[in-house]
Image: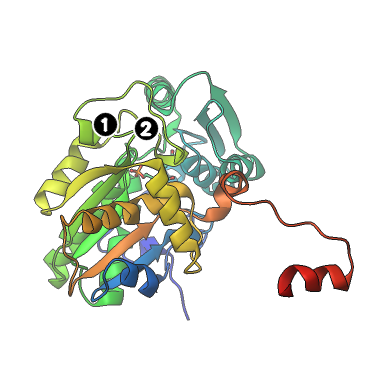
Amino acid sequence: MNRFPLIQRYSIFVDLPEHSRLITLSEGYTPLIPLPHIANHLGGSFHLYAKYEGLNPTGSFKDRGMTAAISEAVGRGAQTVICASTGNTAASAAAYASRAGQKAVVLIPEGKVAAGKLAGAVAYGAQVIQIAGSFDDALRMVVQISERHPIALVNSLNPYRLEGQKTAAFEICDELGKAPDWLCLPVGNAGNITAYWMGFKQYHEYKATGFPHILGVQAAGSAPLVLGHPIDHPETIATAIRIGRPARGEQALQAAEESGGKIIAVSDQQILEMQRALASEGVWVEPASAAGLAGLADEIQKGKFDPKGKCIVAVCTGHGLKDPDIIAKSMPAPQRIPAEIDALEDLILG
Ligand code: AN7
């Protein structure tokens, strides 16, 4: 199959300046994986899919936006790019910047970035800086420095990030033949929910694909959009969405409202339970990536939402390999036996 780079595949919908120079790692084209067991567990009689964004080149949905942001930045001659990140943006920026021959500087909050993300950023050659503060502090700093110096900001405040991320909505419509009835996804800095809503609206204009209701899901300890005010010390095991001042919070609320959806919060325990449920269907995601579906389950189980007959897509934003420690901490250690067949038989048959 001839796989065009995303921003060529959807070139008429993706608004990038003339000067852009294509930088791609063959991102996108991620599968919609049916989740029949979870659907059954939630009452059955509806179609449930995971949009498995963990299969992007650096293991998260961020690559869709990064191909666009870096293509624009390198085309206008930017030699250095910078971002604040809870991890995935850092790894993605590092990879695409390296590919473009640029320097990447990434600021991460102290001690809260999952091992697979940090390792990625380092492996791709970024300058990784930990700050004694939160993601929100880091974001404030990178915005300021990009205003003072010719350093390109590649957080989702950069509009080209959203241009790229919209393509996930197009792919879903192409595969289903129309928009799903509901789309649920985790919300951190709120770039992705904003991009999806832009994407569905734009595709509908051209292709009459319809609109999903959007269910945005935050972690209870980091739920500024649910509480209605910023959080100074956000906490959650889902470190990807440990964000107290979402840069695109207003747009996220608007996306939820306009789509007839909503933004809710779930507990860390619900997130980890859904991470396990997804893994038991063969889809291993990092904790934040299970939040969208955990939110859907919560709505159904509390009787607030009847999924009967609906087509629902849960965006699983990042791969489980990103955060292996969480599994080591919350799951039993491997059983240890002597290297003898008798011991093996005793253990698994006895
Ligand atoms: C796996 O990498 O903010 O609401 O700095 O890594 O668009 O922020 C990551 C966010 C969901 C939330 N799932 O998306 C970062 C960062 C995963 C993520 C989100 C993130 P947004």
Front-lying residue, 34 or 259: 34
What is the quadrant of residue 233 in the picture? Answer: top left
Q: Amino acid at mark 1?
A: Pro
Front-lying residue, 229 or 40: 40
Residue 243 circle label: 2
Q: Is residue 15 left or right of residue 255?
A: right
Question: Residue 49's x, y, as percent?
Answer: 34, 69
Residue at horizontal 74%, vertical 57%? 335
Which residue position holds label 1?
A: 224
Question: Residue 97's x, y, as percent?
Answer: 53, 44
Ligand 1 found in image quarter = top left
Looking at the rendered image, the quarter that the C terminus falls into is bottom right
What is the quadrant of residue 313 in the picture? Answer: bottom left
Residue 27 appears in the figure: no
Residue at horizontal 44%, vertical 61%? 277
Q: Looking at mark 1, is its residue's CB closer than 8 Å to ligand 1? A: no
Residue at horizontal 59%, vertical 51%? 331
